[in-house]
Image (cartoon, helix red, strand yellow):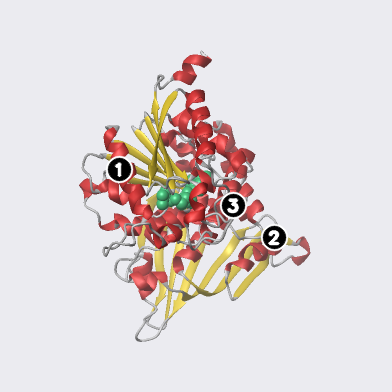
Amino acid sequence: MFLTISTTGTPERPATDLGFLLHKHPGRAQAFSTSHGTAHVLYPEASAERCTAALLLEVDPVALVRRGKGKGKGRGGAPDSALAQYVNDRPYAASSLLSVAMSTVFKSALRGVCTAMPERAQSPLPLRIEVPALPARGGAELVRKLFGPLGWASVEAEPVALDVQFPEWGDSRYVRLILEGELRLADALRQLYVLLPVLDDAKHYWVAPDEVDKLLRAGDGWLAEHPEQKLITSRYLSRRWGLTRQAMERLELARLAESDDLDVEDVDNAVDETTDTEERPVPLAERRRSAILEALRAAGAATVLDLGCGQGQLVQALLKDVRFTGIVGVDVSVRALAIAARRLRLDRMGERQADRVTLLQGSLTYTDKRLTGYDAAVLSEVIEHLDLPRLPALEYAVFGAARPRTVIVTTPNVEYNVRWETLPAGHVRHGDHRFEWTRAEFRDWAEQVAARHGYGVAYAGVGDDDPEVGPPTQMAVFTRTEPKDRNEAKAA
Ligand code: SAH
């Protein structure tokens, strides 16, 4: 398996910068042992004008089989014969292996990380990528369909003849692929990382649930809008329909969250009741964070989940207080998480701080084992972003499955909307709010949730409490009154 990445340059921006972006020096050939064999990175050409990096994977069939018997097979526990059969039947169709090798060898480049030249890593480069023999179920036509919408100036996919001596034998299942255009290197790599195994359509390892996360991470920025999203998702996940459905739903949510431009707090920040003082009014979002922090301290929580953490403002505030020893931000939007990571300077954080904080991508409408064992969970301005029919799924995932001792939920009080001068009558505060509740509606929901899952609930307001319409934000603090394993005990 073989692939080359070329770029052109000028004396000011030499093509050899590719070496920095790939984190692999153009001056030497390097070999990396991966779980399936040895990956070589070498540069057939490296001048200021033109630079080409080649990734070559020597598949080690023994390692492949061994790995199949060991932990690499994944939690799903695929029967050994599935893998052995693959090795016997199709020893050279290794494009998903190449993709795995890419993720090892070009790990930082895939993430778009380059400390030496951060701005080059973020800007498009003239790129030419060639895969001389790409196994492609669906042929050249599908290859064009998959790469066509991804911003390349030219996508050349030529079927490779089975044998050039005997054209009448027809084409092999291989396609010679050449992509040319101006793209960010990380984007190009992430496309290949997903689409090589999709075209190969013979994933060599058992698909574990975290494959959905990998797919969504690598698909960030292009998969949500791709016309062949369904085919890509289902093939990538080896047609495991449950996972495929989950991935597609998360893509849809991510798309919505993304269209939900980044001014979640605009309305909240714009208007505040304390404007008659000379000082800067405290934006509602900030008051909300203070109220949440207070409630967490009062509950004695040390480990906290910020569910739907958005761009990480609360995570940042939590980090400032040493009593919070474990802080996890969860969001469905990869973009929001990327902004959160930047805000927190995760990459430059000292080890001790970094140990306290984790950002996870995930959807709150699915139970998630990673969310168990925490003292408290916060849902700050999140529930109103879900379609009402999905709310019971979130309720179950948080109160039924994760079951932290304390759950804090905030949401707008719709009665207060008449007090926002900038808000036209009958409008919700944000384009992506699926509903906004009155105080009675919120309490009604909270009482039911508490009763169903064995929690007590207390209410508070955030922002100035208007005598007629109440406070702008309503908050409920749930405290678990029944054992953590209540549901299991019931089931038994
Ligand atoms: N908690 C933050 C952000 C609120 S905006 C704050 O108080 O400012 C709502 C956030 O919920 C968005 O970041 C959105 O991406 C996230 N979100 C919406 N639906 C979600 C879901 N099903 N799973 C996880 N996060 C979700």
Q: Amino acid at mark 2?
A: Gly
Left or right relative to 483: residue 148 = right
Q: Which residue is mark 1?
A: 293
Q: Check whether the beta carbons of the residues at disc 2 and disc 3 lie within 8 A of each other.
A: no
3D distance between C-alphas at marks 1 and 2:
56 Å
The x, y position of residue 264, in whole percent, is: 45, 57
Marks 1 and 3: which is nearer the front? 1
3D distance between C-alphas at marks 2 and 3:
28 Å
Q: Check whether the beta carbons of the residues at disc 1 and disc 3 lie within 8 A of each other.
A: no
Q: Which residue is mark 2?
A: 139
Q: Is residue 366 visible to the viewer in this orientation of the structure?
A: no
Query: Residue at the location (45% across, 38% down)?
Result: 72
Q: Check whether the beta carbons of the residues at disc 1 and disc 2 lie within 8 A of each other.
A: no
Q: Callout 3 environment at 10 Å: few (<14), some (14 to 19), or many (20+)?
A: some
Is residue 409 or residue 107 the one in the foreground?
409
Is residue 457 or residue 76 the one in the foreground?
457
Q: Label 2, secondary structure: give it.
A: helix
Q: Label 1, secondary structure: give it.
A: helix
